[in-house]
Image (cartoon, helix red, strand yellow):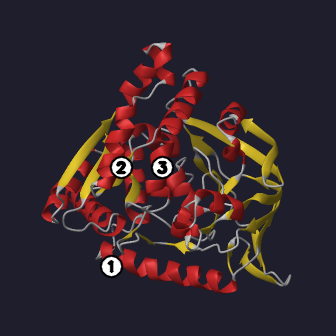
Amino acid sequence: MKHSNHLFYLENYAKVLLDVGLGLRSNDGILLSFDEVGLPLARIVVREAYRRGAKDVITIFADDTMNLDRYNFGMDKIFDDMPKFKVDYREQAFLDNYHSLYITSPNPELLKDVDGDRVARWQKCVSQATEPIQHYQMDNKVKWCVASVPGPAWAKKVFPELEKSQALEALWNLIFEATRMKEEDPVEAWKRHDVLLKEKEKYLDDNNFDKILFKGPGTDLEITLVKGHKWIGGSSKLERGDVFMANIPTEEVFTMPHAKRVEGIVRATKPLSLQGQLVENFSIEFKEGKVVAFEAEKGREVLEKLFAMDEGAMRLGEVALVPDDSPISRRGVLFFNTLFDENASCHLALGNAYGENLRQAQELSDEEKKKLGMNTSMVHVDFMVGGPELEVLGIKEDGSQVVLLQDGNWV
């Protein structure tokens, strides 16, 4: 990839993240999280944000080497304590019209040799500490967007047969294609894509299915949806009317399962990258909505620690439909990154549900939401279940069936 082209696509990426991802308005503030790999894109984002009238961009930097050193050399007690001022700071920013943009460069196996107990304890500590402010993003009280850029470790995981520089260039090409950066006008391309996803959203809402059935190799799962559920595809909206796109890229249309009404077994069709560790070839069995058994060829202990987080971690908070012929899936690459892999495959999420998937959620108390079947948890973990052999059926209250996906694709 020529340097000039790379810079051109990076500038497109920044514009899409601001104009589509955050739907940035004049006088919005941004909490910009990134690492050393994301620095070139972050610099362009900051410049373009100020050009668009942003009141402030607060930069939050992370680094894999520093993260590893913390796990390997930090005092043991620090993995059980997150200072409250960090949470208060972020909450005050949300209240002051700041919105979150995350530019991530995941290393799928960064923590594979780290003490797993420390990883699990820190994840639980952070989740517990931030639980009081999770609703700002889960219920769309602020705008937020997640995007990824490739680093050397991630690129080599995706393309192990290539030299490091070649692997990095290949992954950049894939990401620029998957995020529509090579279109003549990427912002307009995303707006057109949003219209198509909204058509699917409307179709599913109009049918008002009672249940969704997943059938495929190793999978026979019945998911009852909450009463008053709402499907979401593409953009989301704040109460005040701002439109934003939480994931770049996105190909999914998703809604809320009933936390206590999921029955059967489901087999994952792609590895799950979680907290710098991989879980591969795993299946999960549900009864009355709760995980009652699970198997994994690799990373079983990662699932064990996930399910130990809280009661809601053992129940579903999201069901999402993605065709097997989505633009990302057609590239035939396993990304080892949930942001991309979940947009190549139907998926489910363990843990917390999104409030936007429940009609009139803003008017309901937490207890009323829970009574309707909304799951609550400190975590939200997507895992992939789609593929060319998957069939998805929608079941209406009268028992009539509609085939939604056949051989993995929309009918």
Circle 3: element type = loop
Residue 295 visible, this orientation: yes
* Residue drawn at 37 percent across, 26 percent down: 65
Instruction: Locate residue 52 relative to residue 339 in the image: left or right.
Output: left
CA gap, disc 3 to disc 1?
31 Å
Q: Name the residue under label 3.
A: 134
Circle 1: element type = helix
The relative height of residue 382 versus residue 320 in the rendered view (above or below) is above
Q: Quadrant of the N terminus?
A: bottom left
Instruction: Locate residue 395 relative to residue 118 in the image: left or right.
Output: right
- Tell me if label 3 and label 1 are in contact, CB under 8 Å: no
Instruction: Locate residue 227 relative to residue 68 in the image: left or right.
Output: right
Q: Which image quadrant is residue 223 in?
A: bottom right
Q: Name the residue under label 2.
A: 103
CA gap, disc 2 to disc 1?
22 Å
Q: Name the residue under label 1.
A: 188
x and y percentages locating residue 218 in the rendered image: 83, 55
Circle 2: element type = strand
Q: Which amino acid does label 2 sit on?
A: Ile
Q: Which of marks 2 and 1 is nearer the N terminus?
A: 2
The relative height of residue 107 versus residue 57 in the rendered view (above or below) is above
* Residue drawn at 27 percent across, 66 percent down: 24
* Residue drawn at 72 percent across, 46 percent down: 314
